[in-house]
């Protein structure tokens, strides 16, 4: 996990996942080993 100092990603965290569950089915990345996406850290989840 990495935090960035970029203004767009301030208050966010980079998350890596091997798969994503969508509509009850696991989806794996076609190119690469993991999905990566930014998640806001200030949200109450």
Image (tube, grey):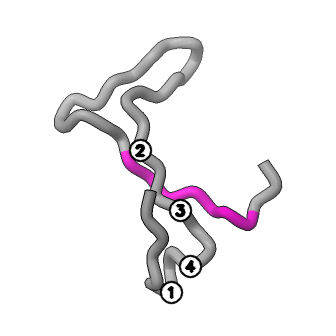
Q: Does dot 4 land on a helix, a strand or a loop?
A: loop
Mark 3: give few (<14), some (14-19) or many (20+) Cα within 10 Å: some
Q: Which residue is mark 1?
A: 7
For the residues marked 2 and 4, what is the alpha-carbon distance in whole angstroms? 18 Å
Within the image, what quadrant is residue 44 found in? bottom right
Give the residue at the far right of this rendering: 44
**Answer yes or no: do the residues labelled 4 and 1 have beta carbons within 8 Å?**
yes
**Answer yes or no: do the residues labelled 1 and 3 have beta carbons within 8 Å?**
no
Q: Residue at x 24, y 34 (%)?
A: 33
Q: Which residue is mark 2?
A: 16
Disc number lying in front (1 or 3): 3
In the rendered image, the vertical position of residue 35 relative to residue 23, given as above or below: below
Give the residue at the far left of this rendering: 31
Q: Residue at x 53, y 62 (%)?
A: 13
The label shown at residue 10 is 4
Give the residue at the far front of this rendering: 1
**Answer yes or no: do the residues labelled 2 and 4 have beta carbons within 8 Å?**
no
Q: Residue at x 57, y 57 (%)?
A: 39
The label shown at residue 39 is none
């Amino acid at each position: 996990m990495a935090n960035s100092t970029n203004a767009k990603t301030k208050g966010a965290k980079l998350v890596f996942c091997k798969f994503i569950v969508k509509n009850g089915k696991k989806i794996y990345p076609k190119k690469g080993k993991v999905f990566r996406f930014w998640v806001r850290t200030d949200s109450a989840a």
